[in-house]
Image (cartoon, helix red, strand yellow):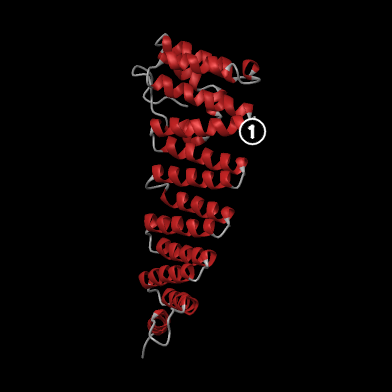
Amino acid sequence: MATGGEAKVREGDKLIIEAEKCLKTNWLKWSADYAGAAHAFDKAALCYRNGKAYDKARQAYERAAEAHYKNAGSFQAGRSMEQAAHVAKEMKQMEQAAMLLETASHYYHESGHGDTAGQVLTKAAKLVDPVNPLRAVDYHLACAELHLVEDKQREATKATRNAVNMAARARDLDKLKEVLEKLRALYEELNMHKQLWNVAAIELVLHLHRDDTVAANDTVVDAAKIPGFLESDERPAMERLCDAFQERDGDAVVEACGGVVFRSMETDVRTSIPPFLSFSLAKIIL
């Protein structure tokens, strides 16, 4: 006698056959029944999932998504593809799950559900963050672009800030610089002056890491044009760090980086930027 799981798998197999019949055409049936096929594929996927045949479940959900899409059901295609991603996640296939979520996002966006598309990309970023933070950066930036299309600058800013954190975690300073430029542009558009001071402080550290004191000084000069910067805590903190670096005073660098301005930065930025003075302590806190 078959177990419950085996029975569910057999039920799923029968539904796959039913779905494939819906897709067939002949001289009496000129067009495929995509709606019927999508319904049968979705049901088959659920049976496989209940029977713990996860790979079959994922494939069935993907085929359901394709059938929904061909039936002009972009949103439904997104839902089925998102379910395929959930199954891949259950199988511990995080990068595969993220790719499926990315496809689901395209379907949601095409159906006019930009918010849902963005949420799915955020999920994808969280899945790959531990193993591929740079890919997570790309997902967060794609999410930001979707929000900008919807004219939602604040949501785009949040997604871009997440991308900054991931770039810092990856310790890819070129990528971090690129994403910071995007974040600065959003902050400028929203007149978020305090946040612009913070961006300037991070950019200062990046320039000092490259021993580019000219660019570092220019960053401080440019920051002075931001309303309120001259009276802010960021100004003296950045000036102290610049002076300490130029004087090659490792202790002063560590002391400057340990100030409240740098310690209050978000965790990934604060802890992930590597040392930039060879004679300073083994790790400089940012």
Quadrant where the N terminus sits is: bottom left
Total numbered circles: 1
User: x, y (%) of residue 41?
Assistant: 44, 76
Q: Which residue is the extreme one toward the left?
A: 278
Q: Residue at x 52, y 68 (%)?
A: 73
Residue 69 appears left or right of 134: right
Q: Looking at the image, is 64 positioned above or below residue 150?
A: below
User: x, y (%) of residue 100?
Assistant: 42, 59
Q: Residue at x 54, y 30 (%)?
A: 184
Closer to us: 281 or 116 = 116
Q: Residue at x 60, y 44 (%)?
A: 155
| Mark 1 surroundings: few (<14), some (14-19) or many (≥20) residues within 10 A | few
Asked which quadrant contains residue 234, the reply is top right
| Residue position marked by numbered label 1 in the rendering | 190
User: x, y (%) of residue 250?
Assistant: 41, 15
Closer to us: 165 or 281 = 165
Q: Residue at x 42, y 19 (%)?
A: 208
Asked which quadrant contains residue 244, the reply is top left
Task: Give the residue type at disc 1.
Answer: Leu
Q: Which residue is the extreme one toward the top?
A: 247
Kind of element beneath mark 1: loop
User: x, y (%) of residue 92?
Assistant: 38, 60
